[in-house]
Amino acid sequence: MTLPAWWQDAVAYQIYPRSFADSNGDGIGDLQGIINKLDYLQWLGVTAVWLSPFYPSPQIDVGYDVSDYTDVEPTYGTLAHFDTLIAEAHRRDIRVILDLVLNHTSDRHAWFQESKSSKHNPKRDWYLWRAGQNGGPPNDWEAFFGGSAWEFDPITDEYYYHFFFRSQPDLNWRHPEVREAIADVMRFWYERGADGFRIDAIDPLFEDAALRDSGVAESITDLWLKYFTSGRNEWKIFREKFHRQFMLPDNYTVLPALRDLTNAYPERILLGETDSVLCYGNGEDMLHSVFSFEITDVASMNPARFREAIQFRIAHVPSRGWDCNTLGSHDRSRAMTCFADGMDNQARMQVALAMTMLLKGTPMFYNGEEIGMEDLPIWDAALFRDGLGIWAYETLIAHGYSEADSIRFADTVSRDKGRTPMQWNGTANAGFSPDGIQPWLPVHSNYTVGVNVAAQQPDEKSLLHFFRRMALLRREHVALRRGEMQLIEADARIVAFRREHHSQTCMVALNMSNEAVPFDFPPTLIFSTHEAEGPRTMLEPYEVYVGIIGERV
Ligand code: NOJ
Ligand code: CA
């Protein structure tokens, strides 16, 4: 396998730059803020970071609407800050993965400005422009973030296509110059020292070339309205609705070129924002990793569903594939909010963190998970920053919902609640921004009751220390880093698996219940949250147990 060992061994950590650390007191996180926290990340046991986009952007989609791929958003710093960040991270053996947003650009990007200027502009076909039909858009396609996928532009009397917001026009991946332009972007950052890319939104890369209708009558607004008001995920219908715009086989045709380019730089990796195992290709020719989102999607203390999702990945990931396991991201509810039950919150979060750290694959933690940060429900419409939350709120109001219900339902889909500033200490603004400054999103008030780094750092019983201990455990045992994985049959309340690498075999047992559960313990204990004297027969409530089954010499 040509998987760089550093990636296989990594404990990875997603930094959301806008919310991580504000070094210059403008209420917005920045690159210098990240540099200032590298010692902390090293102490924590993090060996790779993924930076969400820090490029110039109008911030409609908080940086996922890039208006210049090869520069730094001025509020975040400069290219010189980026160079320092790379040098300082590498000095601490921390690799840096960047976000590559290649499905779409911002409508402010110079490429789109040129493209829209005239039907004859050389960049016209870099995007998807079509004439309308019968006084309306070219077909029935809608955008994932609401409304028609086609936006009319009066300058040339044609529509352009966008899968996300209308300010995020899709690039035309069938155009060789587009592929070359993105290749140049990759080279630019590889040459500046980036260690890889997390590739954003791979699944909507290509659309049906013949522009055939989706044929699904239910509108995206109705689907979202159902989701807002029921909280139920209508993902299956979403998939059907987007079957001409999402996960087309053509997507895989462009991955080998990205891999070839990446292979020209030693030890770089490509991680796709998808759970499609087809993106592994033959294990050598497409992506190094994709996310195991089936496991992430469980998002509750449900051992049966975890076992099923883990077994699914074991069965479907090709032998040369290497998943990235994660509990959350800037797009989801925070893990603590998903796993807490109001009684055993920390113990339950420990189980979730341990599972993510010790499953086969590379773990990726979202900043703040290590201290148990929670969602902050948005209570005032003026506080929404995520375009999706703003659109949802406006749509609900337009459909006659009350102000309070519109905010509450919009908050189910708005991603602001999980993007609030990182909680560093117990001073004003949780130490994210100086006192007296209003951060771009409000800070969760639980920073005053121990949910902050400074409070947990001296406390060996804290979640933060547990995280660090798990990272160390992974580092110390090759089977936990690189081993193959098999589920172990056990009581229904347990998720247990074996990790085996050459001579070493470890076992991980996670009790996902608040009851003691019988368990067949391996001979040698490496770690337990419940150390006890003598032979054991019961796994204690929410116990995390790691043992060695065998070590042949
Ligand atoms: C996935 C990103 O994680 C999300 O935040 C963004 O809105 C979409 N891709 C569109 O770029
Ligand atoms: Ca700042």
Image (cartoon, helix red, strand yellow):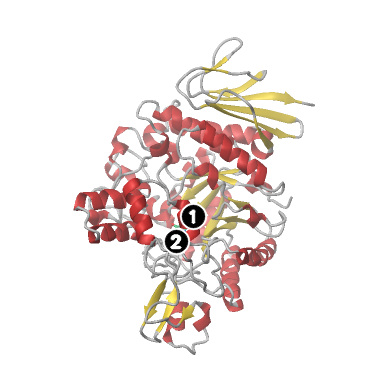
* Dot 2: element: loop
Residue 129 placement, left or right of 286: left
In this view, the residue in front, 397 or 255, is 397
Q: Residue furthest right?
A: 553
Query: What x and y, as percent, mark residue 134?
Result: 39, 82
Quarter of image, ligand 1: bottom left
The response on whether ligand 2 sits within 8 Å of label 2 is no
Graded by Cα atoms within 10 Å as few (under 14), some (14 to 19) or many (20 or more), the crowding at tag 2 reads many
In this view, the residue in front, 470 or 294, is 294
Tag 2 residue:
54
Tell me, yes or no, whether the two marked residues, 1 and 2, touch with CB atoms within 8 Å: yes
- Using the rendered image of the protein, determine whether residue 268 is visible from the camera's viewpoint: no
Residue 184 placement, left or right of 216: right
* Dot 1: element: strand
Amino acid type at mark 2 = Phe
Q: Which residue sits at x=57%, y=72%?
A: 173
Tag 1 residue:
51
